[in-house]
Amino acid sequence: MIGRRQFTRQIARQLHTSARNSANQFSIPRWAYLACGSVILGAGVSFWSVNSSIVRSDATFASVFPVSEVMKHNTMDDCWIAIDGHVYDVSKFLAQHPGGAARILRFAGSDASSAFRSIHTESVLNRMKEHVTYLGPLGEGEFLNKAKKEQKLDVALGDKPSLAHIFNLSDFEFVAKKVLPQTTFTYYATGSSDEFSLRENRYAYSRVFFKPKALQNVQQVSTSTKMLGIDAELPLYISGFAGSCLAHPDAEWNLQRAAYKEKIVQMVPKQNSIDFDEFFDGVPADQEQWAQLHFYTDEELENMDEYINRFESRKNIKGIFFNVDVTALGNREKDSKVRALDEDLGEALNEMANNSGAEYCKTFTWDHVRKLVQKTNLPVGLKGIQRGEDVVLAAQNGIKAVILSNHGGRQLDFSRPPLEVLAEAKQMLKENGLEKDIEIYVDGGIRRGSDIIKAICLGAKGVGMGRPFLYAMAGYGEAGVVRAIQILKMEMINNMRLLGARNIAELDESFIDASSLKLHNPNVNDRLYDENYVSLPSPPWGKA
């Protein structure tokens, strides 16, 4: 985690971009910005902003405000709030808040640091510059009204295991459950309806077994490969997903920096927590990335040129993937149930999860896909393909890559595990003579280096991972994401040596037994996964 004072200063540096950022359709949509703002202070203060004079040395501050003084300012006409060691007067903002003044007043005269850090990136604080006044640094004392659950999270974050005690990706998830608010963790972890697809994504990998070759020279083992022409140290990319700001203040910066250090591909999402230009201006010139897009409206679909041109202008982008599995939002029941019980984060997360936000485009067809291919020189990929026949259609229509995905089990429940679809798709491509015309990637359920190897053996060019990296940065920031990638690499090298494979090119179907892949056995157990899994709650009894 970055320090509190450092975080606040970094936020202040972004003030000059406020007007431009709020209108940027290529970052988080306007409704999502409102969601992020509503979540602040537990669905309280929206779009913080401070006077740019905050960027100055400590010696020039005129006053220090002790906790006892801050607690006195707790009324509609006189409302102060402390965030990360600094004090702000939000009295003028009460009337401006779209969710009503009451949401802010419940935090009046108190420390809102934990709630603030649970949602914000450094660039979001600058949205309501003219309505919020920065007063000065917070002095000594202890707030008497700090929520017990906030105190518990602060203690958990301070007492978490060191990275030296993290040995696998499930360990990161275990830590994330302790350091994130329950509502936030559930938002990440939830699947749709009864979550069969969510669980099957994981269990599918336990139905594929290895057939190692003996007496192979495996002194030198390489995990490097190419993905859409990009050199990568692992056949792995960081998936694009919304809500990184809920896990850590640096959000996608953590992912970008870790991907650059470990030489893997980052997929930059349309719903990036960080402004488009601000983000890409900070990306090293030699870092190669993918972009992920989807369409909310028919108007966006018809104006696809704007999206394509925007990303083409960034030389880092080497491929654009379009979501094809979001004609509607999945029934994320567990998420909705938990949010309904959370007065602080619930309503605002409704917006971020899009339950009450924009509709998704329902008219995106293969005709549009052909237009997309014609409008760009970048490779075009489709994310969310779920049947072999559509992989064949994609190859026939000029698509260079598909990601077999059921959106992490968050969309249509009982959609098949991507690993199962992979075996089907490879066979259909062979039958149609298209195997060399398109690259296939899979995501969902991957937790081990051995899982990556199984996917490669079945014909995948690489795999994508999302939740594990969110969990890693929730507890450890950028260092956690780096550690997660390193763990996967170590596991891959170890497994490849034991298999008798020296490089990615040697991995093929001869190393695996996938005869049980389609047997959806409910008795399969994965202890680490099962211990972290939280089942759907029943309605509250006597708690309404």
Image: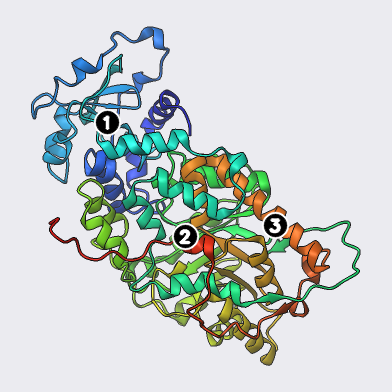
Label 2 with label 1: CB-CB less than 8 Å:
no
Specify whether residue 155 is in view: yes
Pointer 1 residue: 129
Query: Which corner quadrant of the image does residue 489 belong to?
Result: bottom right
Identify the residue shown where x is 39% and y is 67%. Answer: 191
In the rendered image, the vertical position of residue 258 relative to residue 437, given as above or below? above
Q: Residues within 10 Å of mark 3 (few under 14, many from 20)?
A: some
Q: Indicate the amino acid at tag 2.
A: Glu
Give the number of the mark in front: 1 or 3: 3
In front: 278, or 515? 515
Looking at marks 1 and 3 on the same chain, the residue that comes earlier in the sequence is marked by 1
The residues tagged by marks 2 and 1 sit, at their Cα atoms, a distance apart of 45 Å
Horizontal side of residue 190 vs 201, given as left or right: left
Please indicate whether residue 57 sits to the left or right of residue 258 in the image.
left
Image colouring: rainbow
Residues at circles 1 and 3 in contact by the CB criterion of under 8 Å? no
Disc 2 from disc 3: Cα separation:
21 Å
Badge 2 marks a residue whose secondary structure is helix
Label 3 belongs to which residue? 491
Of 106 and 376, nearer the camera is 106
Badge 2 local density, few (<14 within 10 Å), some, or many (20+)? few
Query: Which is in the foreground here, disc 2 or disc 3?
Result: 2
Q: Mark 3 belongs to which amino acid? A: Glu
Q: Residue furthest bottom?
A: 431
Residue wearing tag 2: 531
Q: Position of residue 534 (x, y in %)?
A: 38, 61
- Please state the horizontal and vertical placement of residue 451, each as a whole percent of the image: 63, 67
Image position of 317 (left or right of 330): right
Closer to the camera, 537 or 505?
537
Residue 324 in sight from this viewpoint: no
Camera-nearest label, 2 or 1: 2
